[in-house]
Each structure stands twice: as structure tokens, then as C-alpha cells.
Image: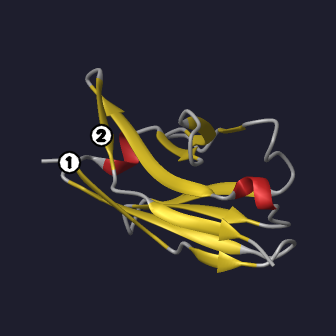
Amino acid sequence: QVQLVESGGGLVQPGGSLRLSCAASGTIFSTNTMRWYRQAHGKQRELVATITSVFNTLYADSVKGRFTISRDNAKNTVYLQMNKLKPEDTAVYYCNVQIWGMDYWGTGTLVTVSS
């Protein structure tokens, strides 16, 4: 059974940084494309960043140059380093993996950017 567990969220001031982690189990992690999504209150879930099995990365325009996705296959963990945070980055952040057409999600971690 695939399980994803996010951590690292919290309250941060505008301009600050946070690093989110997502620990995966029940899958051959190194072969998976991993994604981070976020969902702000009252809005649809949106794709933030993607990292493939060969370490190619993609970012939403809204986070380019501020966020960095990375992975450690030895730890079955994907990270999202978030710098220069803005109030509009406030959301619940979710880790995602698709395996044989099925989506798996973690329970999310809340990031609040506020002074």
C-alpha cells in the first residue's frame, strides 16, 4: 500500500523560508515522478512542482525562482524548499504520486505566510 506523509509546514513571515518533506512507502520510489500540489482556502488544488525519476524538474510560474523540488532516493523522500515566501503561498501542500493511473496523496501540511 502506497503511503505519503508530508511534514515541515508552519507559520512563517513574508520573505521567509520553509522546507517541506514527503516520505513515501509502499512503492519503488526511485522510479516514480513525484509532485507537490497546494490548495488555498476556497480555491482549486494546483500543481506546484514536479521531479521525475531522472531528476528533471518543472515548476508553476508562480513559484519559479523561489521554490526548489528535490529528492533523496536513499530516504524515499521528496522535498520542497520554499524561499521568499509570500502571503499568497498560504495553502495546504500535498505530495502526490501516480502509479498505474492511480493518484496517491498525503494528508497535507499547512503553510501559513503572515506577519
Q: Position of residue 18 (x, y in %)?
A: 67, 74
Mark toward the start of the polypeptide (2 vs 1):
1
Quadrant for the C terminus in the image? bottom right
Residue type pointed to by label 2: Tyr
Q: Is residue 7 left or right of residue 103?
A: right
| Neighbourhood count class around disc 2 (C-alpha, 10 Å): few under 14, some 14–19, many 20 upward | some
Q: Is residue 26 left or right of residue 36?
A: left
- Whether residues under marks 2 and 1 lie with C-beta atoms below 8 angstroms apart, the answer is yes
Relative to 28, say whether 114 is above or below: below
Q: Assign a secondary structure to mark 1.
A: loop
Residue type pointed to by label 1: Val
Q: Residue at label 2?
A: 104
- Tell which residue pokes out farthest to the front in this image: 42
Q: Residue placed at 72% from the left, 55% from the top?
A: 89
| Neighbourhood count class around disc 1 (C-alpha, 10 Å): few under 14, some 14–19, many 20 upward | some
> Which of pointers 2 and 1 indicates the residue nearer the eye?
2
Q: Residue placed at 80% from the left, 67% from the top?
A: 83
Relative to 14, say whether 54 is above or below: above
Judging depth in this view, the residue of 109 and 31 nearest the camera is 109
Q: Quadrant of residue 75?
A: bottom left
Q: Position of residue 105 (x, y in %)?
A: 33, 45
Q: Position of residue 56 (x, y in %)?
A: 64, 39
Q: Residue placed at 87% from the left, 72% from the top?
A: 15
Q: Residue at label 1?
A: 2
